[in-house]
Amino acid sequence: MLRILVFSLVIALSSVAHFAAAQGPLVPGTGTRIWYDDFENEEWEYVPNNPKASHEQDNQVRLPGGMSKNKMWGESSKRGHPDHIERFHTPPDGIEGSEGSLLMMTLQSNVPGRPSGDLGQDDLICRIPGSYAVSSYPSCVVRVYLQPFDKWEQYSAAASFGFRATVMGSRQKQSGGGLFSFNKTEREQSWPGIFIEHQLTKEGSRAFWVIRGSERGDFRGPEITETGWYTIGMSFTPDGRCHYYISKGVDDLTAEDRVGSHKPYNYTIESVQGMFFNVFNHDDGKSWSTPWIIDDPAFYLGRGGRPAR
């Protein structure tokens, strides 16, 4: 009898695992929207409370930190916020009916008031409450407007823009050696994302999507040959993978827009704590970053149908 029960349990667990694997990637924007900002309120405003944080460089947080008046956006205590954050008129060919978007630019991307001459980055945090297990199928989506290349910062850098998630994951690591070797579980927070890389060549600007990351690290995605609006998103599934999606235009993402599915840096993702944006520039005290415009960022849970906008 015990053998039959054990066998039945094994079959049941196998079926659950097979079912989970069979679910496959999740299109970002599926399910119930739990956090969302469309910037349509003409009173939308970000209060910077400068000087901003630069804890990553000099251990200075400089409270109280920046915050939007609707309390949905906040400064990163690690790196500080972009120096210019403004509700902005939506560029042409955006979401139908949209009048407001968000413009982000930065100037002092390392320590405020102390230009370094190096590539730096600032963060703008979406204040999504809670932490969500991958079993709840979290995902995030945003529309991003790419200015004509002649308006990009004229500096060839590793990255110019990033859309990222905060996740917790684990992986097995071998320790010791010989007869005394053993595997231990490492748990670590990480920040997978979709980046835009800008290069200056003799022929002019070139830009690429960069995925951070795969099991082996970051990898370059498609080249960006057209500017204008794009829709990008990430989703997270119970197999511990992040699925990356990119599409030209502002239509909802589809299964055909997936550019990769990975366990970032070989960590099995267990939970998602939120999402945020990076803005990069050459921190020389005078070169503003490329002006980045986003619209309708949203965070979702579940596998159900899409909610109405």
Image (tube, grey):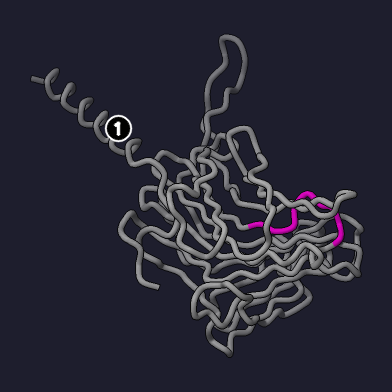
Q: Which residues are magenta?
A: 154-162
Q: Is residue 170 above or below residue 254?
A: above
Q: Is residue 97 left or right of residue 209?
A: left
121 or 175: which is nearer to us? 121
Q: Is residue 260 left or right of residue 67?
A: left
Find residue 150 and report its image quarter: bottom right
Q: Is residue 92 left or right of residue 256?
A: right
- Magenta stretch containing residue 161, yes or no? yes
287 or 134: which is nearer to us? 287
Residue 219, x across and y down, in percent: 66, 39
Q: Name the residue: 45% across, 45% down.
A: 270
Main SS of residues in magenta: strand
Q: Quadrant of the C terminus?
A: bottom left
Q: Quadrant of the N terminus?
A: top left
Residue 303, x across and y down, in percent: 33, 54
Spot the residue most to the top.
Answer: 179
Q: Name the residue: 41% across, 67% down.
A: 34
Q: Is residue 290 left or right of residue 86?
A: right
Report which residue position mark 1 lands on: 18
